[in-house]
Amino acid sequence: MLAETVVAPTLQTPAGRHGLQRQMLKWYACAGRQLPWRQSRDPYRIWLSEIMLQQTTVAAVIPYFERFTAAFPDVKALAAAPLDDVLRLWEGLGYYSRARNLHRAAGLVVSEHGGQFPADAVQLQKLPGIGRYTAGAIASFAFDLPAPIVEANTERLYARLLGLQLDVRSAAGQKQLWAFAESIVSTERPGDFNQSVMDLGARICTPTSPRCSDCPVREYCGAFRLGLQHELPRKPPRAPVTAIAELAVIPMRVQQGRRQFLLRRRDTGERWAGMWDAYREETQPEILDALPVSAFQTKPRSRVGSLFSAEHEQLPAATLERVKQQSGAVLGAVTAALQLTYAVTRFKVRLTAVVCRVHQSPRSLPDGWSWHAQEDLGELPLSKTGRQITDWLQQFGN
């Protein structure tokens, strides 16, 4: 061990590590969490849960997991499903690349592995969206292989056990954590052991208020011995939050008495790739300030014609031109507006969404653009803010 750790002498011997394993398994038998994906060793259910749990809480995942397994009970059903159906079920869980990778990986499991997940951590990592931790989790939970795991809960627990003074996100810190995880994973019950350390991190060795008096392995803990349990693990400072302004533009037309809205499918490489959305652009706060939003209809009126009964401000000419270049639509005045705020990664976004009447519809739409009837908006896969916008659009005429 490096000087940056104060690991207890007992953990440096096989007997000491076996003692920690026994304590963890004994605690887990009494205090382990009862979770729906732990009801079997089905690698499909375990894989699905682990992908969903990436950067997402257990409480948030459970209802999504239950809906997913009801809709796609096995990997073949998931592989056969349209991507739009997968994205629609994922809506609201965030980090949508996980859903796209889930769908791709399911297809590969079916086409290249006969519908059976590889029982090997190295092979599992060749599937989209599966990194070292997820591969170790599947290998140990489904196949009871002694694979190490390091994720948010175990990272914190291991850093405290080691008394690790390094930044846990640094290359040196990660190297020590993975080496430690490999040294202590049980060879007899690796799945249960890995579940136990995850649960201890989630329930006892918590980020801000570790319950050391209830910890079954505090005698092994370097941070506890030094009184550093509230200071460890050490992490890099968080990036500052940046405020940005965003304008969303939704062209609208009425055909045969039915409202239609022009949306675009976001491209590969964009945030929310594969999801439908309004045209959006980053703008200056003063542009949003100049829009007399209070004069617009934020709760649309009941009749189709009433939307066009008043002429309001035009959008900036540059925005109108960009919408025309991308979609082919020539827009008129703003007839309704909605203001939202949302956070994504390190950005706090102030968003104004506006509905504009269409003066001239394009004869043919560019790839990725489509008119959507008002009554069909609820079926589209959308981001959380996209859903807020379409929920608002569906109020027109109600």
Image: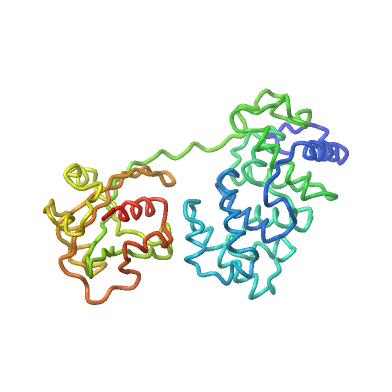
In the displayed structure, does residue 52 sit left or right of residue 327? right
Instruction: Identify the residue at horizontal 15%, vertical 60% (top origin).
Output: 332
In the displayed structure, does residue 157 sit left or right of residue 89? right
- Answer above or below: position of 216 versus 137: above
- Answer above or below: position of 70 versus 79: above
Instruction: Identify the residue at horizontal 67%, vertical 33% (top origin).
Output: 205
**Where is residue 212 shown, x and y percent of the image?**
70, 26
Front one among 396 and 315: 396
**Where is residue 266 shown, x and y percent of the image?**
38, 63
- Answer above or below: position of 140 versus 103: above
The quadrant in which residue 165 appears is: top right
**Where is residue 374 shown, x and y percent of the image?**
32, 62
The quadrant in which residue 34 appears is: top right
The number of numbered discs placed on residues in the rendered structure image is: 0
Instruction: Identify the residue at horizontal 17%, vertical 62% (top origin).
Output: 331
Colouring style: rainbow
In the displayed structure, does residue 398 sit left or right of residue 135? left
**Where is residue 97 shown, x and y percent of the image?**
50, 59
Q: From the image, which quarter does the N terminus lie in?
A: top right
Instruction: Identify the residue at horizontal 61%, vertical 40% (top origin).
Output: 168
- Answer above or below: position of 47 versus 30: below
Report the residue that reaches farthest toward the right: 15
